[in-house]
Amino acid sequence: MVAAVGVLAVALLAAGNLAGSATTGSSGSHRIYTIYSGRPAGMTDDGDGRAVEVGVHFRASVAGAVVGVRFWNFATNAGTHRGSLWSTSGRRLATGLFTAEPRVGWTTLRFAKPVHIRAGTTYVASYHTNTGHYASEPGVFSNGATVGNHVLRATAGVYRYGGSHFPAERWHGSSYFVDVLFRPAHPIHHPSPSPSQSATSATGTRQVGCAPLPSRCGYPDATNTGVADGAVRRKVPGDVTHGTGWHWDSRGWVEIDGDGATFSGYSVSSGIDVTASNVTISGDEILSEGEGFAIGFRHTANMTISHNTIYSPVQFGANRLMTGIKDVFMDSTGTRILANNIYHAQTGVQIDAGLIQDNYIHDMGYVSGDHVNGTTSNAVSGSLSIIHNTVFNQFEQTDAVSLFEDFGAQYDRVINDNLVAGGDYAIYGGANPGGTPPHNIRITNNRISTKFFPHGGYFGPYTAVDPSGSGNVFTGNVWDATGAPVT
């Protein structure tokens, strides 16, 4: 994408115009919420004149309906525009043409029928322009930053050049100022600007006791992650053995070796090996067991793994799944792991760089000698964001979320807005006595549950946190049962 001149997300937050809502009636039941309010600061005409679909990843903290989409228009962005709502697997849920567009300002499309969405689930809103010149600002979503309010949060800007197709590419954390019109299923009479985001009640107060039913507070659980109920999936290799960019390897696994391949809508009783870039694995049921991984990838870039159910039929013993999702050499870049339901694994997700968001990792697997991890990083390279996941490890070792210095220093990590419980400690913060001090580790706004142990983890809620390291932050973390700060 063409670079745009503008301030970064910090300036946007300081301007105070990221949390917005438009009211279409005095009753709370008629209120329409949006991500942005007014004219966003720092936004400019990108200057790129190519045809492109630009959009936004967003989620709502409560269930409701998307009644339309909107985008900020410039006079140079001429012609007819089509707006769309998508699932993260690329299924178009609604679309329509914008009419009566202003030369400059918010341009709104209302869908013929509202689209009901689930709390805590990520969706994509977008529009297509044939003439380019879309609104843009780089850096808004860098380092795991989100924007919005306690009802709606935007988490990424996305694009795709050409016709009106599902946008999945990202450029330098850019926002393209695409928005949604969202109507909650139940009235929110007194919205609060509380930074607690998803775990905020309809009265604007922080909810407590989210662990028994995480989705009640907008967190991931079985109701809003994994494959959709009733989805028709073809069996590999029973029904199909190959597709564009992938094939069934006779040695007993799926091999994805074609750049840009999409593997979606399948049921697999084996592992998946990925050696290509720009790959999407979405909407699949992946049953794998033993000393391997359900999805392993090597030397890849820009891979998306979303809305899959990943598990072993056996929770204990040698046939439990060793690792749900693993970057084998820890050198892949641009990895996004979104809204997966992972269980009966010794380790849920093991990567060193990328984004882990909206996943439900639970009911861990175990065989004697295992080190059990919800998500874990071993400090090889790259920045990592772990945002808005539910991670429950019922064992008294090792962790729900961990940063370890097995191969180098931990740095540039965001652990934000997760609901966690269990392990020796629920969170390991990357410090290692005698090792290189970790830096730029931000552990914020997480909820620690006593679901398994009275101290969150068997020994305590967290360990290996170095408050003296450059850029390290530990703030806003609370006990799930009470909302009291974890100090």
Image: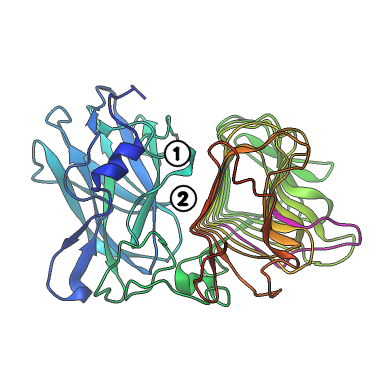
Query: Does 148 lie within the magenta span?
Result: no
Q: Residue 448 or 236: which is nearer the viewer?
A: 448
Q: Residues within 10 Å of mark 1 (few under 14, many from 20)?
A: many
Percent x, y for residue 408? 73, 32
Kind of residue at badge 2: Thr
Q: Residue 19 or 130: which is nearer the viewer?
A: 19
Q: Residues within 10 Å of mark 2 (few under 14, many from 20)?
A: many
Question: Looking at the rendering, in which quadrant would you find the N terminus?
Answer: top left
Kind of residue at badge 1: Ala
What predominant SS class does the magenta segment belong to? loop
Q: Looking at the picture, does residue 419 appear above or below residue 299? A: below
How far apart are labels 1 and 2 at the CA level?
9 Å
Query: At x 77% / y 42%, what residue is drawn?
Result: 433
Is 152 left, or right, of 398 in this rendering?
Answer: left
Query: At x 24% / y 75%, what residue is drawn?
Result: 189
Which of the numbered marks, if any, corresponds to residue 329? none
- Visible residue check, residue 353: no
Does dot 2 land on a helix, a strand or a loop? loop
Is 225 left, or right, of 153 in this rendering?
Answer: right
Determine the image quadrant of residue 230: bottom right
Question: Looking at the rendering, in which quadrant would you find the C terminus?
Answer: bottom right
Which of the numbered marks, if any, corresponds to residue 88? 2
Mark 1 or mark 2: name the one nearer the start of the chain.
2
Range of residues picked out in magenta: 359-374
Residue bearing the label numbered 1: 168
Q: Looking at the picture, does residue 186 appear above or below residue 477? A: below
Percent x, y for residue 386? 56, 49
